[in-house]
Structures are given as C-alpha cells and as structure tokens.
Amino acid sequence: MSKAKRTRSVPRPQAQSGDWRVFIRDLVLTCRIGVHQHERLADQRIRINLDLTVADQGPIGDDLDKVVCYGELMTGIRHVVGSGHVNLVETLAERIAAMCLEDRRVARARVRVEKLDVFPEADSVGIEIERYQPET
C-alpha cells in the first residue's frame, strides 16, 4: 500500500506596503577637498554612494512628482560638491545627507564619500554616515 504524499497548505503573507530604497552608486566627481595645502590647489576625485529609505507614499500612478527623483538628487549632489572647498569628507557627507533630508519623504540617508587618489596602495579612503529625518 503506497502512502499518498500529503501537502500542507502554507498561508501566504498579505501584500503590504513598505519602504522604498532610492540609491545612487559610484558617482565620481572632482572637488576641492582636504586640509593640506596641496589639496587646496587642485581638484581631487571623490566617489559618492547614496542610499535613501523613503516612506511608501501610496499609489504613484506613474507620476514623477510622487517619487523621490534620483535626477534631482544628482543635481543636488553636484551643487553641494561644487559649492567650494571643504576640509573634511565628513563635512561633505553631512551636507549631502542634509540636502537629501530636505525632502520630508526621505526617512533615512546613508552617504558614503571616498577620496580616490590619496594612497597608492588603497583604492579609497573616506567616511560613511547615516542620518534620519528629525522628529517633528
């Protein structure tokens, strides 16, 4: 007598709304950054990575105005980076995070800024920060 294979019904989770992740990966720009005199005289290459958590805003209806636009983020980053000399990568990362959090839909901003040409034996050096939307 053969035993019939029993299958057990496993309940499927209900679809739920959740956070969105908006990101920019490996954006390479040049800027004046650093505390040393030679860093004040010439542009340096930096790499920026951005990872944002955006609260679900409900149906978007294929409408650009209902999402955090990575094109606008790119423009904002270029503006921050191009707004003059900064001493520290930490300061630049803070400014980029603050720009991202100006959009109230952004709940969290993780920003990594790397200097690419500092040490020949290292691909990069830098900082990564994570900042959150202030409680209101």
Image (cartoon, helix red, strand yellow):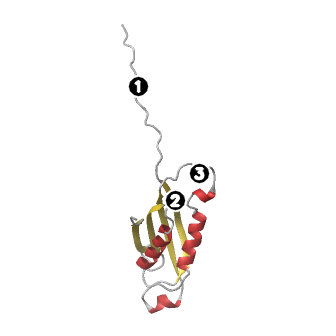
> What amino acid is found at the position of numbered circle 1 in the picture?
Ser
What x and y, as percent, mark residue 37? Answer: 45, 92
* Label 2 or label 3, whichever comes before in sequence order: 2
**Residue 119 is at least partly visible in this image:** no
Q: Quick check: 41 above or below 92? A: below
In which quadrant is the N terminus drawn?
Answer: top left
Residue receiving disc 2: 22
The residue identified by callout 1 is: 9
**What residue is shown at x 58% (from left), y 62% (from top)?**
69
Query: What is the x, y in percent for residue 10?
Result: 40, 29
- What residue did someone put label 3 on? 60
The residues bearing labels 2 and 3 have C-alpha atoms spaced at a distance of 15 Å
Q: Amino acid at mark 3?
A: Ile
Check disc 1 and report its element: helix, strand or loop: loop
Give x and y (percent) for residue 22.
52, 59
For the point 40% across and 69% down, the residue is 129
Q: Earlier in the sequence, mark 3 or mark 1?
A: 1
User: Which quadrant of the view contains residue 28?
Assistant: bottom right
Numbered mark located on residue 129 in the image: none
Mark 3 or 1, which is nearer the eye?
3
Q: Is residue 133 visible?
A: yes
Count of marks placed on residues? 3
Which of 76 and 28 lies nearest the eye of the viewer? 76
Count residues near mark 3 (Cα–Cα under 10 Å), then give few for <14, some for 14-19, many for 20+.
Answer: few
